[in-house]
Image: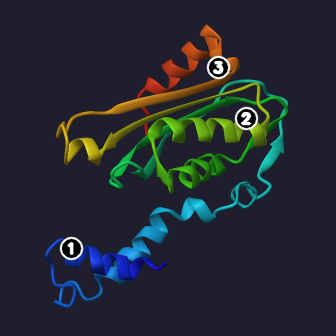
Amino acid sequence: MEIEPLIKQLLTELGENPEREGLVRTPHRVAEAWKFLTRGYTQDIDKVINGALFKADAQHLVICKDIEIYSVCEHHMLPFFGRCHIGYIPRDKVIGVSKLARIADMFSRRLQIQERLTEQIAQCLMTHLNPLGVGVVIEARHLCMMMRGVEKQNSNMISSALLGCFQTPATRAEFFQLIERPTHHT
């Protein structure tokens, strides 16, 4: 089933005329937008990582914070967006830093709930990097809560997944302390 006829029917059901000037190309534009917004379904994790795993002797905390994420809530198909913070302690290899953002993007570009998204990113890193532990925190704003329903525009949801050594109090505390520090851009 193609998306374009569905969007044309949706426009009609909403009381619009899909043949009017401003809407004639809308079904095509919406179809292209949805392919982009859900491209995570067609991505392969091995191609995303693309061999960017490197031997390393250091077993210290590595963090990439403030990774922008954009996703779509599976319940109302409205966007949610925010920041993802990823930390891990390598066992014997590290991953290219851009791959952390690409992994977050791959899982966020699907119909999602934030809780599952957080867990998927963490589990993916545990599986493919085999670190001592992984921590993932996502802070997001959900349009399904802001634009409709309870209409709470200032709400922010925070979810975390802490695996391996990130479940110990000291590592957990260090991770949360570091992701809460302001980032200084030079």
Q: Residue at x 79, y 47 (%)?
A: 53
Q: Residue 153 carries which label?
A: none
Q: Is residue 138 above or below residue 76?
A: above
Q: Residue at x 58, y 35 (%)?
A: 119
At which x and y percent is residue 85? 52, 35
Q: Residue 166 carries which label?
A: 3
Q: Estimate the spatial distance between the alpha carbons at disc 3 and disc 1, rounded to whole Å.
A: 50 Å
Please name the amino acid that badge 2 sits on: Met
Q: Estimate the spatial distance between the alpha carbons at disc 2 and disc 3, rounded to whole Å.
A: 12 Å
Please name the amino acid that badge 1 sits on: Glu
At which x and y percent is residue 20? 16, 89
Q: Residues within 10 Å of mark 2 (few under 14, many from 20)?
A: some
| Residue nearest the viewer, comparing 7 with 179 | 7
**Element type at mark 1:** helix
| Residue nearest the viewer, comparing 166 with 182 | 166
Within the image, what quadrant is residue 122 found in? top right
Q: Which of marks 2 and 1 is nearer the N terminus?
A: 1
Q: Which residue is identified by label 2?
A: 126
Q: Residue 13 carries which label?
A: 1
Q: Is residue 69 left or right of residue 170?
A: left
Pair 2/1: label in front: 1
**Element type at mark 3:** helix
Please name the amino acid that badge 3 sits on: Phe
| Residue nearest the viewer, comparing 142 with 171 | 142
Badges 2 and 3: C-beta atoms under 8 Å apart? Answer: no
Q: Earlier in the sequence, mark 2 or mark 3?
A: 2
Within the image, what quadrant is residue 89 found in? top right
Q: Estimate the spatial distance between the alpha carbons at disc 2 and disc 1, rounded to whole Å.
A: 46 Å
**Element type at mark 2:** helix
